[in-house]
Amino acid sequence: MSGRFLSYVVAALLLSITFIQGRAQAGRSPKLFVIWDARGKFGYMDSSGKVVIKPRFDQAYPFTEGVAAVRIGNKAGFIDPSGQPVAPFRFNTASPFSDGLAEVSVIEGSGRNRNFPCGYIDHSFQFVIKPQTKFDCDGSFQEGFAVVSTYDDEYHESLRTYINKHGEFAVAGRLSVAKPFSEGLALVNDFTKSSMVNHEGQTVIDLRPKNRADTFSDRYEPDGSFSEGLARVGIIVSGSSGYSRFAYMNLKGEMVFKLPEQVRAEGDFHEGRASVLQMKTERVQVEIGNGERIEMGVDVSGYGYVDAQGKIVIAPRFSKAGDFSEGLAAVRTGKLQPIDRRDLAGSAAESYFDRDDGHWVCIDRSGAVVIKKCGEPLSYNELVEKFPYFGKLFGKGFVDGLFFQKTRVGRRTLYGYQDRTGKYVWVQPHGKGVIPPRW
């Protein structure tokens, strides 16, 4: 009898585990990737390049938290991994889910009285923060808060602040700078000082000089985001302009390490590596006419990587470098480039740097080349203007096994997805009759 009872218990437990696992699988964001066809319509493929959701949308964002924001005509909404709407398309704009909420806007009024108030919905696709005009939504929720803009009558301009998930102003008041939270802290400036604050708005790191009475103390300026417990910091020495040195700071505001002189912090830490730029003078042979060659000194910059202790683990030998993701980073070989090309305008050295046989490769954390021909990461302007809300590493490195990048097809530069073997599983449609998408 006890044996039969034990069998029932085991069976029940196995059934419960299977049910929980099924729910967990259903809740995961599928590995689908945004693509478009020759008509400029957006759809989705899987990691092998197989079309899973046929292109039919006028705009589409990546899947996050199990759904994707898309638009057809002038109506936006959300679809599931099969491409089916999960709720009626009733929004003017819709953005991907983050931290359980998604930013949307609606249309109110008509003609000159028409406006587009924004709000936030949850996974029931109902408003938890109703559309309103007391602030403008500036981004998605991170760690329970979103940055918004609100017009200030005293300053006669839009200032920034935070809202919580109830739509209430939180953390801090009127700010000239308000960065999204990362690892529990956010960079703010309240017109009197810069500081890193926690979720309660308490100052955790005061960025004023350590001895506030000493106006000759150095000033430390982080870029605003922590990654793997560290943030980039520029050091301004009193009486000088620009950053004199660079460092990385921990969550307590302590300088973990300063970079050597002539080495500048470029990237955040990802997978124990951060990109840095080293400035140095390089002797180059240039032709000045009649076949005569002379040697010139040119200030150039090389990219490499440091570890979390500040040790240079990949020598600054690349002309460009990106962040690590999924064990790989895109870097460019070839001649190290001048710090400022404008300084060479009209000089004999200008043509020397125009003749560059470098190309993009992908390296591992030791600096070894893994993919001999990688595409070029997207520029900041491309990410902001064409692919907002696509994620921090999208267009910069591998995400879910694929790298969205720029590649050359003949004389044309096109977007495509490359896998970890170096194979392109999708390249955007090109040729006659192709209609570019409307970003």
Image: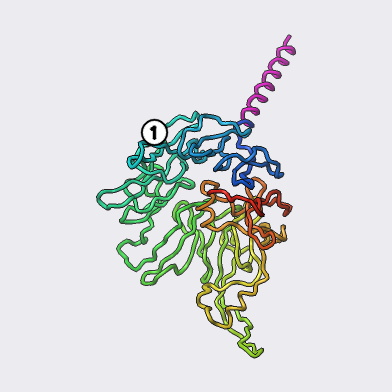
Q: Quadrant of residue 370?
A: bottom right
Q: Is residue 167 above or below residue 226?
A: above
What's under tag 1, amino acid-wise? Lys
Q: Is residue 79 above or below residue 189?
A: above
**Along the line of sight, the residue nearer the viewer: 96 or 255:** 96
Toward which corner of the image does residue 23 lie, by quadrant?
top right
Q: Main secondary structure of the magenta part?
A: helix
Indicate whether 139 appears above or below 295.
Answer: above
Q: Which residues are the magenta region? A: 1-24
Please tell me whether residue 225 belongs to the stretch shown in magenta: no
Residue 20 image point, x, y percent: 63, 26
Q: Locate residue 2, reporting x and y percent.
A: 72, 11
80 to the left or right of 374: left
From the image, tell me which residue sits under label 1.
130
* Residue 12, magenta (yes or no): yes
* Label 1 element class: strand
Residue at x 65%, y 24% (from the top left corner): 19
Residue 225, placed above or below residue 136: below
